[in-house]
Image (cartoon, rainbow, N blue to C red):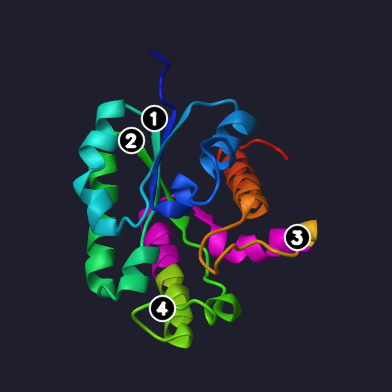
Amino acid sequence: MERTDLVCLGDSIVYGYGVSERYAWPCLASRELGIHILNKGENGDTADGMNVRFMEDVVWNHPKEVFVMAGANDILMGIPQAHTRESMDMIIQKALAANILPIIGIPLQVDGAMLKKCWYSFFSIEETMEIFRSYREWLLDYCEKKQIPYVDFQKKFPEYIEKKGISRAFRDGVHPTKEGYAVMADIFCDTYRKMKGVVL
C-alpha cells in the first residue's frame, strides 16, 4: 500500500466541486510535487464536521502531514466564528498529538460581484466578505503564534489570476473554474516548496 505523504482535509474547494477528480487542485499538486496526496474534501463540510472525522480521514491514514482548510461554509451558513475557531484549534491539536505536521489553508475570498446573481449566504455580501477577511487575520495570527505553516489562498489567488491573465476564475462566485483550481495547485506547490526550502 502506497504511503500517504499528505492528507488534504477540507470542503468542496478541496474536493474539487465542478470538475472531475483529476482536475481537483490536490490531485494536480500531487502530480506536480511527486508525493502521494489523499484528497479528503467533502462538499458542504464545516470545521466542526472536519473535527469529527479527523481520526478516520487523517490519523488512520498515517500521513506525515495534513493540510486543513475549513471555515468558508461556516461563514456562509452563519455559524458563529467562535465555534469555527474552536473547531480549528481542536483539529490542529489533534494533528500535533498524532505527530502529524499541520498546514493551514486560508480560504479563498468569495467573488461578491458574481454572487449578487446567486446569493445564498446567511449574511449580506458585504458582511460575508468582511468576515472572510477577519477570519484570514485570525488564522494568520494563530499560525504565527503556534508557528504553523499556512497557504494563503485568499491573498495569492487574485495575484496569480492576474499574472496568468485568466478572465474567469470562479464558476459561481464561490467555487473555482477548472483554470481556477489549476491556479490553486500552483499556489500550493509554490508555497509547499518554500516550506521545504526548495529554491524556485
Q: Nearer the viewer, mark 1 or mark 4?
A: 4
Dot 4 amino acid type: Ile
Q: Nearer the viewer, mark 3 or mark 2?
A: 3
**Whole-percent x and y of residue 101?**
38, 39
Q: Which residue is mark 4?
A: 131
Q: Which residues fall within the magenta stretch? A: 138-162
As measured in the structure, the alpha-carbon distance from the residue carrying label 2 to the one carrying label 1 is 5 Å
Q: Which residue is mark 3?
A: 166
- Quadrant containing the C terminus in the rendered view: top right
As measured in the structure, the alpha-carbon distance from the residue carrying label 1 to the one carrying label 4 is 32 Å
Q: Is residue 106 left or right of residue 64?
A: right
Q: Nearer the viewer, mark 1 or mark 3?
A: 3
Q: Quadrant of residue 180?
A: bottom right
Query: CB atoms at circles 2 and 1 under 8 Å apart?
Result: yes
Q: Badge 2: how crowded within 10 Å, few (<14), some, or many (20+)? A: many
Q: Nearer the viewer, mark 4 or mark 3?
A: 3
- Quadrant containing the N terminus in the rendered view: top left
Dot 3 amino acid type: Ile
Say the numbered circle drawn on residue 134. Answer: none
- Disc 4, SS: helix
Dot 1 amino acid type: Lys
Q: Which residue is mark 1?
A: 64
Which numbered disc, 4 or 3, marks the residue that appears first in the sequence? 4
Which numbered disc, 2 or 4, marks the residue that appears first in the sequence? 2
Can residue 98 be seen in this snapshot? Answer: no
Q: Is residue 19 left or right of residue 87?
A: right
Q: Which residue is mark 2?
A: 100
**Predominant secondary structure, magenta span:** helix
- Disc 1, SS: loop
As measured in the structure, the alpha-carbon distance from the residue carrying label 4 to the one carrying label 3 is 26 Å
Q: Nearer the viewer, mark 2 or mark 4?
A: 4
In magenta segment, residue 157: yes
